[in-house]
């Protein structure tokens, strides 16, 4: 399951965004100066808020298993206590993007 990267809201509406492009569209839609929250991971999303993006609009992404790796190994890699291995994976696959909204405000 994909979790949102951003929450963009004003007093009337909340929009959960899964990409920077969606965040920019939400900012335009809500106009003014909406509140923008950046979620760093699932642990930052409260259980009460979690229910807002589970339902008909849920975003699921298939997990492809390598025949050579067992489900237990996969879960241990992503959820286990192997912080150095995960850190190396993140660094090797890191993509740095410019925040276009912040760049335009400078």
Image (cartoon, rainbow, N blue to C red):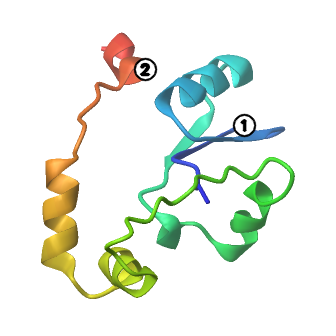
Do labels 1 and 2 touch, CB within 8 Å? no
- On screen, residue 25 versus residue 86, left or right, reads right
Percent x, y for residue 70? 39, 81
Numbered badge on residue 101: 2
User: Which type of secondary structure does the marked residue at label 2 adopt?
Assistant: helix
- On screen, residue 103 versus residue 12, left or right, reads left
User: Which type of secondary structure does the marked residue at label 1 adopt?
Assistant: loop
- On screen, residue 82 versus residue 74, left or right, reads left
**Who is closer to the viewer here, 11 or 4?**
4
Q: Residue at x 51, y 35 (%)?
A: 19
Residue that label 1 marks:
10
The answer to which quarter of the image holds residue 83 is bottom left
Vertical comparison of 9 with 74: above or below: above
Vertical comparison of 77 with 15: above or below: below
| First along the sequence among labels 1 and 2 | 1
Q: CA distance from mark 1 to mark 2?
A: 17 Å
- On screen, residue 9 versus residue 37, left or right, reads right
Percent x, y for residue 105? 38, 15
Q: How many marks?
A: 2
**Who is closer to the viewer here, 16 or 14?**
16
Q: Residue at x 71, y 64 (%)?
A: 49
**Who is closer to the viewer here, 17 or 95?**
95
Quadrant into which the N terminus falls: bottom right
Q: Residue at x 44, y 65 (%)?
A: 65
Frontmost of labels 1 and 2 is 2
Percent x, y for residue 7? 61, 45
Vertical comparison of 83 with 64: above or below: below
For label 1, count other residues whose C-alpha is less than 10 Å away and answer few (under 14), some (14-19) or many (20+): some
The answer to which quarter of the image holds residue 88 is bottom left
Percent x, y for residue 84? 13, 75
């Amino acid at each position: 399951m994909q979790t949102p990267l951003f929450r963009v809201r004003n007093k009337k509406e909340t929009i959960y965004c899964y990409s920077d492009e969606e965040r920019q569209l939400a900012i335009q839609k809500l106009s003014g100066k909406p509140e923008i929250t950046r979620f760093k991971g699932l642990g930052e999303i409260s259980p009460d808020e979690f229910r807002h993006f589970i339902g008909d609009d849920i975003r699921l992404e298939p997990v492809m298993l390598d025949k050579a790796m067992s489900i237990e190994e996969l879960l241990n890699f992503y959820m286990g206590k192997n912080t150095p291995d995960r850190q190396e994976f993140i660094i090797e696959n890191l993509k740095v993007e410019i925040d276009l909204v912040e760049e335009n405000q400078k």
